[in-house]
Amino acid sequence: MKKIYSALFVLGFILLAGLKPASAQEMGGAQAARWDVTKLATVNADQATVWELISNLKNIQLYAKGFIKSVEIKGSTVPFDRIITFEDGTTRTEQIDQVMREYKFLSYQIKAESLPKGLKDVSIGLFTKSKGDSTEVSWQALIEGSNEAKKAFKEQLSVEFEKYASGLTDLIKNSTPAAKMN
């Protein structure tokens, strides 16, 4: 199942970026994902700048608008874990599965011990797409589990993704660009 989600994330990125895969066979026969939660944000910075910020996985705390109290990274080779402590004291362990620098996207899943009751799997992709002088950032999640648990977690992730989107937009808007040296 995790291989299918990884293939869906790659396919989702290709669709988001407007690229065409060489063949469906190369994508492992993956079909277009039907995301359970999606949040788009347009950030007024180039893609390289945005990617530099979000690909440093501890930086999520900078643009979470106080929603995240601390972040701990365990490991450096994919897959590795990111442990997030939220403002209410709860923790969540995420397994970082892909950090695709050349395509500027990443994917992770919430580890089983951190899943709410009734959920079997939650996989999340964070995609970026250049839009001239700005960047489109997309948080997308696939959720597997009972309908009731899924509904509750969709609401939770929607709030979480909204905080990330507005926080990232504000952080970039309020940052001072580096001065160019002659």
Image (cartoon, rainbow, N blue to C red):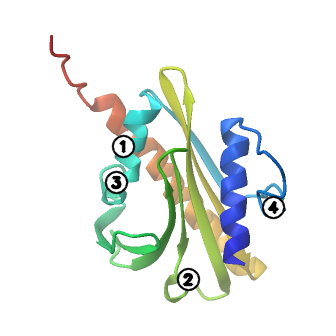
Give the foreground label among 2 and 1.
1
Residue receiving disc 2: 115
Residues marked 3 and 4 touching at CB (< 8 Å): no
Residue type highlighted by circle 3: Asn
Image quarter of the C terminus: top left
| First in sequence: mark 3 vs mark 2 | 3
Residue receiving disc 1: 52
Instruction: Say few, some or many: other residues with alpha carbon within 10 Å of mark 1 (under 14 / 14 to 19 / 20 or more).
Output: few
Distance of mark 3 from mark 1, alpha carbons? Answer: 7 Å
Q: Is residue 141 left or right of residue 168?
A: right
Name the one closer to the observer, 97 or 164.
97
| First in sequence: mark 4 vs mark 1 | 4
Q: Quadrant of residue 71?
A: bottom left
Query: Residue 56: which disc?
Result: 3
**Residue at image point 69% right, 45% down:** 14
Name the one closer to the observer, 3 or 47.
3
Name the spot of residue 6 as percent of width and height, x first: 66, 65
**Residue at image point 35% right, 51% down:** 65
Residue receiving disc 4: 30
Residue type highlighted by circle 2: Leu
